[in-house]
Image (tube, helix red, strand yellow):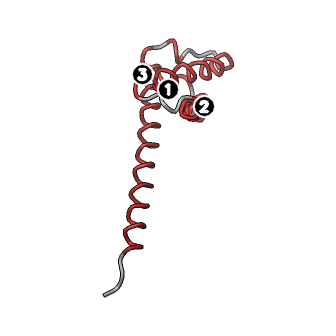
Amino acid sequence: KFGKIGLKLAGAFIPGLSTAVDAIVEAMPGVKGPQKKEAAMVMAKGIIEGLEEFKGSDLMGNAEGVALVGALFDAEVGARNALTKLQAAREAVRAFAATIKKP
């Protein structure tokens, strides 16, 4: 189970997954959807396996662990997409507001 890994390992690899997502976004801007997820999962697997050596755990050798890391990736990408939409909406409102004149 995920809980057996310990909070310290989880705390260490979560930023690593964010780094993997950043690297994929920058290195392969045209990569989308499942291909992006697969590339980030490969990077995350390397990061996590390196950390596991120190902890003696095997998150990525466990189907539930791989699924949880995949869910974490999906949430990370979803949050980034939501932030992008929020920023675009804010800019649209600002641009529209700049065109409105008092009667």
Q: Which residue is mark 1?
A: 3
The mark nearer the N terminus, 3 or 1, is 1
Q: Secondary structure at mark 2?
A: helix
Is the Cβ of the residue at disc 3 closer than 8 Å to that at disc 1? no
Q: Which residue is mark 2?
A: 16
Tell me where residue 17 appears, x and y as whole percent: 56, 31
Tell me where residue 72 appears, x and y as whole percent: 46, 32
Q: Quadrant of residue 45?
A: top right
* x 43%, y 36%: residue: 75
| Front of the two marks 2 and 1 | 2
Specify few, some or many for label 2: CA neighbours under 10 Å numbering under 14, 14-19, or 20 or more.
Answer: some
Specify few, some or many for label 3: CA neighbours under 10 Å numbering under 14, 14-19, or 20 or more.
Answer: few
| In the image: residue 48, left or right of residue 100 | right
Q: Which residue sits furthest right? A: 54
**What amino acid is found at the position of numbered circle 1 in the picture?**
Gly
How many numbered marks, from 0 up? 3
* x 40%, y 47%: residue: 82
Q: Quadrant of the C terminus?
A: bottom left
Up/down of 94 relative to 56, above or below: below
Q: Secondary structure at mark 1?
A: helix
**What amino acid is found at the position of numbered circle 2 in the picture?**
Gly
Is the Cβ of the residue at disc 2 closer than 8 Å to that at disc 3? no
Cα gap from disc 3 to disc 1, whole angstroms: 14 Å
Cα gap from disc 2 to disc 3, whole angstroms: 17 Å
Q: Secondary structure at mark 3?
A: helix
Along the line of sight, which residue is nearer the eye, 71 or 29?
Answer: 29
The mark nearer the N terminus, 2 or 3, is 2
Q: Which residue is mark 3?
A: 67
